[in-house]
Image (cartoon, coloured by chain):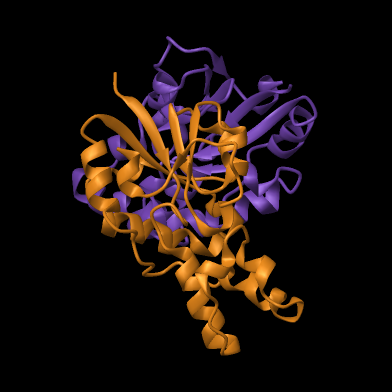
Chain colours: A purple, B orange
Amino acid sequence: MKKSIAIDMDETVADTLSRHIEWYQQHFSVTLNKENMRGHRIYDVVPEAHLTTVRQFPHHPDFFKGLAIFDDAAEVIKELSQSYDIYFASAAMEYPSSFAAKYDWLKKHFPFISEMNYIFCGYKGMLNCDYLIDDSSRHIDVFSGQGYLFDAPHNQNETQYKRVCNTNQII
Amino acid sequence: MKKSIAIDMDETVADTLSRHIEWYQQHFSVTLNKENMRGHRIYDVVPEAHLTTVRQFPHHPDFFKGLAIFDDAAEVIKELSQSYDIYFASAAMEYPSSFAAKYDWLKKHFPFISEMNYIFCGYKGMLNCDYLIDDSSRHIDVFSGQGYLFDAPHNQNETQYKRVCNTNQII
């Protein structure tokens, strides 16, 4: 029986941070620099006065549409799918207006993974998979299998996790 | 630590079959009788000529809106939630246009269960819960914990499963 890998979407295969920066620029005419966001989420670096607006961005049904895919993600996951059962596990319940965009995005970029292997959830402790690759340590903390922290600007100071620094390192 | 129960939606807490019968009546002016559907899904009992249309019903975004909730489901699950972690696990990936209706329905009828405990998936073998209550034996077959078949007309001939005959029996 193949072992199973659950792969997060935002900031693991989809470049959600760039969308955040793009919308922030459009709304406030300020360009955020990813280099300055090391160890911080976007909510930590914008002025207090912008926070309510920025927190609303991901609740817009267009926010998750057409996100860029990280380099090599499709090729790497296609290769992995030969030897592992691949699931995509997104904490989409945090942004219920994102369901359609997330589903369409997965269908477009990973046509070789059945939609029966998509999981839109909240709490990732309920995943029965062998491995989880996720940029959020809070999901790895509750996962019952072996978690790997996917490198992202916001998690640079989290040193207690096994880390994959880019998509190719997953292999 | 509390044990966890994953509860299916359609035909376990939500009366999806009545919606099917209602839409079938509206489209074809024929009233199906649940008593005649014992051991059969709706797709088994309608004429071949109607099948394509009937199979499309659940793909309409309104199909899952405002479904009736089964008797006592809210009260029973509220009581269970005192002693168990409750998850709702729906194979919603089969009907991606159902996401919004399913989310809204759960929020309305089970406001005491966090949306972080909703799971929209396909394959229920990836659920890490102690129990699963589901009307579809194919989900119980792949579930790693203890499954209970929730009584529904279509599953009357499936005798090899532990069965709960109504919502109160879950307790």
| Residue at the extreme top of the image, as rendered | A160
Decide which of A32, A43 is in the foreground and name it.
Answer: A43
Q: x, y (%) of residue A147?
A: 52, 18
**Residue A122 appears in the rendering:** yes
Taking the spot 19% from the left edge, 49% from the top edge, the residue there is A49
Q: Which quadrant: the N terminus of chain A?
A: top right
Decide which of B13, B87 is in the foreground and name it.
Answer: B13
Q: x, y (%) of residue A119?
A: 53, 42
**Residue A66 appears in the rendering:** no
Q: Is A17 situated left or right of A13 in this image? A: left
Give residue B85's quadrant in the image.
top left
Taking the spot 47% from the left edge, 64% from the top edge, the residue there is B16
Q: x, y (%) of residue A103?
A: 58, 53
Taking the spot 76% from the left edge, 44% from the top edge, the residue there is A112
| Residue at the extreme bottom of the image, as rendered | B29
Q: Is B79 situated left or right of B24 in this image? A: left
Q: x, y (%) of residue B72?
A: 26, 54
Q: How many marks?
A: 0
Residue A49 versus residue A34 in the image, above or below: below
Q: Which quadrant: the C terminus of chain A?
A: top right
Taking the spot 51% from the left edge, 28% from the top edge, the residue there is A134
